[in-house]
Structure formats: C-alpha cells, structure tokens
Amino acid sequence: MKLTVIGCWGGYPKQNEASSGYILEHEGYHLLIDCGSGVLSKLQNIIQPEQLDAVIVSHYHPDHIADIGVLQHARLIQGFLGIDMPTLPIYAHEFDQHEFAKLTYKQITKGIAYDPTITMKLGPFQVSFLKTNHPVPCYAMRFEAAGKVLVYTADSSFKEEFIEFSRHADVLLCECNFYGHQNGQSAGHMTSIDAGQLAERAAVKQLILTHLPHYGNKVDLITEASGEFTGIIKLANEFLSISL
Ligand SMILES: [Zn+2]
C-alpha cells in the first residue's frame, strides 16, 4: 500500500493547500479518502480525477467533503472530452440522508452506503469502521491489504475503542487538531498527547499527525506526542508519501 497526503489541514485549507484528503493505492487501485476543500486542485499533482477508482468519506463536514461537487464536474467534463470512464463509487454513511443524496450525480458518481458494523471489501482493501466521538456521525477506518494495515482516525476525540481498532497498525493516520495543553473533548478532536498515547497503547509502527491546527508551532505536536510514543512520528504535509 502507498499512502499519499493531499491535504492535512483541519477546518479549512491553509493558503494554497488543502484540507483532508489522502490517496491510498495498492495494485494500481486508487482510493481517495475524504475530499475536503482544495483536494481536487492538489490531487492533480499526483493523479487525474478520472483515474480514481473510488472515494470513501468519513463524515460530512466541509473540510472532508467540500470538493465532492467539483470532482463530479471534473469527471463530467472529462467525459464530454471523450475520456471513457465508469461511474465513480463514493462510499459514505447514510446517517445524513440530505448529504448522502448529493454523492449521486447523473451517471458520474454514485453514493454507496457502507454498513459500519461489517468489514467491507473495497477494491484490494478490507475496510472496517469505528464510530468516532464527533459532533456529527463520523467513522474511523482500518484498511488492510497484503498483510499491511493503515488506520485513519478521521475526526474524533479520544475513545478507548481506538486502541483495539488501531492495534499493530503499520501506519496510524491520526487527527491532531489540538496541542497537548488544550482539551479537545468537547470539540470532538484529539490532542498531540491523545495521539501519542493511542499510538503507544495500540503498539503501532508509525504515527502520522494530521488534521492540523492553523496556529502555534506545529513541531510542538511532535515533541508532545513523542513524550508518549517511542516509535516514528511525522507531521502530515502536502504530498507526504509513505509505503506500507
Ligand atoms: Zn469534522
């Protein structure tokens, strides 16, 4: 598996960058995980929109879905220009019917509800889900292929169930919207300390901090997390690429 960060900003994109979006690739299959603001522009540095095989969405906050509409337009226009491509499946939960309905657009994209209680096969990946602590329904995802594991927390405050869910992951892509001295619980986000403790208790190999705050010295997030976790820690940044 290869993970490439397209955008790593929480809430909204930093100038000239993108909010949440990640490409997960295996055996030529390209899955886009979340599609926040700025993602469609930035992902074209890595892959063309018509080359995506599927999209999966954690929840319906704009920093995770804002560019779904323009992704649909991109595939529509490339189709007019003669590029032949199948309907793009967009996997998401259906616990917000208004938002879920928007994932289906002409023959261009089709919203497909995942059942978070079961493990799903998606291309070459086995995907399982964990409901997170967030103001709206949101699901963390565990992707497995060829004996490797990526866990993406999506947006959440810390919850104990993350430990088992993340157990022995090769990469834990963990949201880290707050610094160690802050309290993310009411906002539904984790701190650097939460992320470090989760990585340590789940015995993951590598921790990538993402969904980053727009203030403060971000290197402090690493320093704080490394007080809890002795493994490799990185800050997500645009086009960071990790092979699992
Ligand atoms: Zn959110």
Image (cartoon, rainbow, N blue to C red):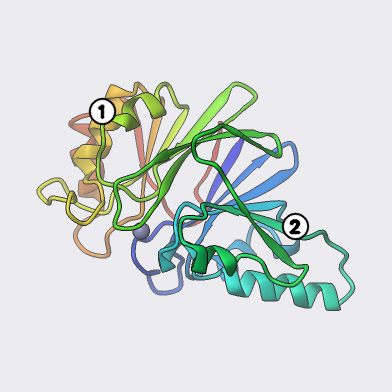
Above or below: residue 169 compared with residue 185:
above
Quarter holding the N terminus is top right
Above or below: residue 56 compared with residue 1:
below
* Kind of residue indicated by mark 2: Gln
Instruction: Name the secondary structure under disc 1.
Output: loop
Q: Which mark is residue 71?
A: none
In the image, 28 versus 141, the foreground residue is 141
Instruction: Name the secondary structure under disc 2.
Output: helix
Which residue is rendered at x = 47% and y = 70% of the image?
A: 37
Question: Percent position (x, y) of residue 102?
Answer: 58, 69
Crowd around label 2: few <14 · some 14–19 · many ≥20 (10 Å) = some
Ligand number 1: quarter of image: bottom left
Alpha-carbon span between mark 1 and mark 2: 37 Å
Q: Is mark 2 within 8 Å of ligand 1?
A: no
Q: Which mark is residue 51?
A: 2
- Tag 1 near tag 2, CB within 8 Å: no
